[in-house]
Amino acid sequence: MFLSIDAGNSNIVFGFYQEADDSWEEELRIPTKKGMKVYDLEKNLALFFLEKNWTAEKIDQIGLSTVVPDLLPVLTRLCLGFFRKAPYVINESSYGLLPVKAMNPTEIGTDLMANITAAYLRFSSACIIVDFGTALTFCVVDKKGEVIGVNIVPGIKTAINSLFTNTAKLPKVELKLPESALGKDTVHAIQAGIFYGYSGLVKGMVEAIEMETNCNYQVVVTGGMSSLMGHLGDRFNNVDVNLTLKGIYAITKLNLDH
């Protein structure tokens, strides 16, 4: 079994891929915290493996992407200690063998390159990958596999937390799509503003990209918050919550099996 580790600003996701069945069997999601120790992660993994009746030997290979530099040594020690295997750490030198090419390899996050790689390997055509994470990102790759642009916006949860933190009376609200775009009370007003506002932002961004490049793109949606955006319409129905994990797998395999 292959293990993809996607360490982001909000969560560390452990995705378990059964290569024989071509299936992502399980997922463990641990909230990212400052000052995390190997023990904190090892405790969660040990419990998870116990519940699944798995042993660490079940893992054959590990691919790791992190956009949090402080987590790299922690996760590397975790892999060496718990699985007795060194992870393949994705970085800018990993991209030479990929079917996609980045304009500035040192500036694009490894999670975004994983998304781009997985989407392009699936469709082999021009794509816009919309990732609803801590940040809302739009990655644009043309039909030749060249990354021609990336746009970054504060994510939905980030926007709500900012509103709650920086105002005296506005409450922290549940992330839920309201039935109406017209707010009837404070909570409803925030929910409507966030969800219908972000819907317009996403549709408008895709439209602007297509107008500027004179190209019709395959839109792929991913990220932890993507399940909350089902109202975006048919154009955004291609949702793959495992896209980053699949990209980590692909990049690791393309490099280690070369």
Image: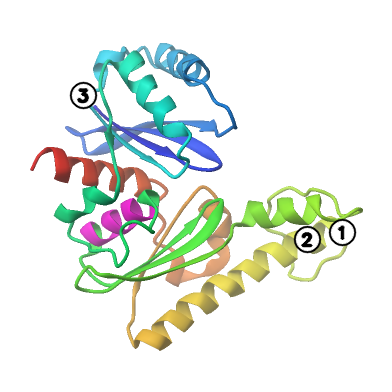
* Contact (Cβ within 8 Å) of mark 2 with mark 3: no
What crowding class fits label 3: few (fewer than 14 Cα within 10 Å), some (14-19), or many (20 or more)? few
Q: Nearer the viewer, residue 119 or 69?
A: 69
* Residue that numbered label 3 is attached to: 60
* Contact (Cβ within 8 Å) of mark 2 with mark 1: yes
Q: Nearer the viewer, residue 61 or 121?
A: 61
Q: CA distance from mark 2 to mark 3?
A: 46 Å
Q: Nearer the viewer, residue 160 or 90?
A: 90
Q: Disc 3 or 1, which lies upstream in sequence?
A: 3
* Contact (Cβ within 8 Å) of mark 3 with mark 1: no
Relative placement, left or right, of 228 versus 151 is right
| Magenta residue check for 114 | yes
Q: Disc 2 or 3, which lies upstream in sequence?
A: 3
Per the rendering, the mark at residue 190 is 2
- Asked if residue 115 is positioned above or below residue 51 in the image, the reply reads below
Per the rendering, the mark at residue 201 is none
Please provide percent x and percent y for residue 9: 53, 43
Q: Amino acid at mark 2?
A: Ile
Looking at the rendered image, the quarter that the C terminus falls into is top left
Relative placement, left or right, of 185 versus 80 is right
Please provide percent x and percent y for residue 161: 72, 50
Q: Secondary structure at mark 1?
A: helix
Start-end of magenta stretch: 112-121
* Residue that numbered label 1 is attached to: 186
- Asked if residue 235 is positioned above or below residue 245 in the image, the reply reads below
What crowding class fits label 2: few (fewer than 14 Cα within 10 Å), some (14-19), or many (20 or more)? many
- Asked if residue 59 is positioned above or below residue 225 in the image, the reply reads above
Q: Amino acid at mark 3?
A: Asp
